[in-house]
Each structure stands twice: as C-alpha cells, then as structure tokens.
Image (spheres, helix red, strand yellow):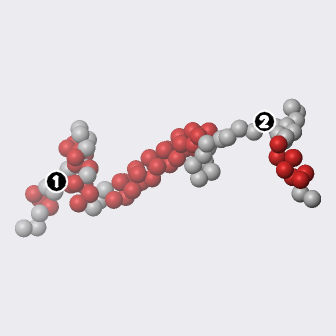
Amino acid sequence: MFATSILRSAYPAYKSPYGPKYQYQPHIDGITPKQLVRILPTAAAWTGVALFAVVYYASGIPRLRRDVLQRIPYLGERYFVNEIPASDNPF
C-alpha cells in the first residue's frame, strides 16, 4: 500500500532549468553582509553625531571636563580648561 513512497525517495526531485537558482545567503539575525555594508556608514554617522551631542551638552559638568575632555591631546589643554579669574573670586 505504501510502496510508492519508498520508490519516490529513490529518484531525485525534478529541478527545472528555468526556475530560480537558490543559494544559501549567510546572515546574522536576518541581516545579510550586503545590508550591513549599506547600513554601516549611516549608522556610524548617526553614532558620531549622537556622541558629539552628548559631549556638547555634558561639557559643563566639571567631572566630565576634567576626566574626559582635558585628556584629549592638543585640544584638552587649550579649550577645556576653565580657569576663573581672580577678580571673580568672592573670597
């Protein structure tokens, strides 16, 4: 009764020469390397803009200015040192 299913497995499945040629496409969570190469420059630009905005808005915090911004070579010692003149000191 089920002898035909055994015979079918012996023959390869028909593959039309006019059909699509499928190939394995590597991906990580659905993102292919082609998509990653296309998205990466935009993501890097937005990340740079976001980092600049965070540093700009937080540059008034003394701890950030002292620990991060003043340690930038050449720029830190010139632009991020906040010295209060003696005339503004109330004591």
Q: Which mark is residue 83?
A: 1
Q: How many marks?
A: 2
Give 27 or 70, whichever is nearer the viewer. Answer: 27
Q: Quadrant of residue 22?
A: top right
The percent coordinates of residue 21 (x first, y second) are 78, 35
| Lateral position of residue 73 relative to residue 23, left or right | left
Q: Which mark is residue 59?
A: none
The percent coordinates of residue 81 (x first, y second) are 20, 50
Give 21 or 62, whichever is nearer the viewer. Answer: 21
Query: Which residue is most to the left?
Result: 91
Query: Which residue is most to the right?
Result: 1
At x 89%, y 53%, the residue is 3
Mark 1 crowdedness (10 Å alpha carbons): few <14, some 14-19, many ≥20: few
Dot in front, 1 or 2: 2
Helix, strand or loop under label 1: loop
Residue 37 versus residue 4 in the image, above or below = above
